[in-house]
Amino acid sequence: MEDSRPAIIFTDLHKSYGELEVLRGVSGTIRTGEVVAVIGSSGCGKSTLLRCFNRLETINGGQLIVNNIDLSRPNLKTHQLRELRSQVGMVFQQFNLFPHLSVVENLMLAPQKVQNKSRRESLQLAHHYLEKVGLSQKANAYPEQLSGGQKQRVAIARSLCMSPKILLFDEPTSALDPELVGEVLMVMKQLAEEGMTMVVVTHEMQFAREVAHRVIFLNQGLVEEQGNARQVLTNPQSDRLRAFLSRMNLVSSAS
């Protein structure tokens, strides 16, 4: 970790969909340069929390500050939202690449449209980050010509083209065949080693234990347990986390 400055501060967050309360008072801090894995069973609120961090979801209560932008305000200005989206990158499960654009065109789009960069500068960025994720040779290919792992690496490169301060990953390997997971996790591990602030919703417990600095375990919309990744995943304190890790076959192999 580079330093202890907060990149994200969330206090007593609440989020409901109608009568369904998904987040029921979640609090925590993500420091600059920190990698935090958010884990928990399906439906516990992991993805909802992540989507709140870049205002894809609007919170119903509590306070949320991301890169000094107060997302608790219901009347967030358009320029503030634009600033947030340029600073906070999001990598989804399903890649979300434009099928009618080539790989390099997918990467160039946001820098040109959101940051008003020139075509030349956007092209340079695109090639730089394609090389970073090991896909220089696929610049002129189209998404349908790529494997799932390659699509996800392109999606990561696309986020990096915006020079984000924070990267959010929502189950980035869940849609991949098992043999393709490693190539995506390798890129994420490299980003972590370079000091990128990352919040990763994941079921990859080995990745969480080896790469994340901290783990947040959500259960039924609440933080059940959080702390140092290796300590929490090797020696869980709560019965619910122990049961969850047993289902993930991690407790018995933890060392």
Image: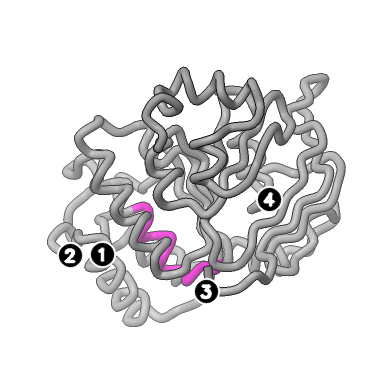
Q: Position of residue 63 (x, y in %)?
A: 84, 52
Q: Sort mark 2 into few (<14), some (14-19) or many (20+) by Cα contacts within 10 Å.
A: some
Q: Position of residue 28 (x, y in %)?
A: 73, 50
Q: Amino acid at mark 3?
A: Gln
Of callouts 2 and 3, the N-terminal one: 3
Q: Which residue was labeled with disc 4?
A: 55
Numbered mark located on residue 136 in the image? 2
Q: How is the image coloured?
A: one colour
* Callouts 1 and 2 close, C-beta under 8 Å: yes
Q: Which residue was labeled with disc 3?
A: 115
Q: Nearer the viewer, mark 3 or mark 4?
A: 4
- Judged from the image, the secondary structure of the residue bearing numbered disc 2 is helix
Question: Any magenta on residue 161?
Answer: yes
Q: Position of residue 179 (x, y in %)?
A: 20, 34
Q: CA distance from mark 3 to mark 4?
A: 19 Å
User: Which image quadrant for residue 194?
Assistant: bottom left
Q: CA distance from mark 2 to mark 4?
A: 32 Å
Instruction: Compare residues 221 and 34 and report the one nearer the observer.
Output: 34
Residue depicted at x 31% and y 62%: 105
Q: Amino acid at mark 2?
A: Ser
Residue depicted at x 42% and y 52%: 211
Of callouts 3 and 4, the N-terminal one: 4
Q: Which residues are magenta?
A: 155-165
Q: Nearer the viewer, mark 1 or mark 3?
A: 1
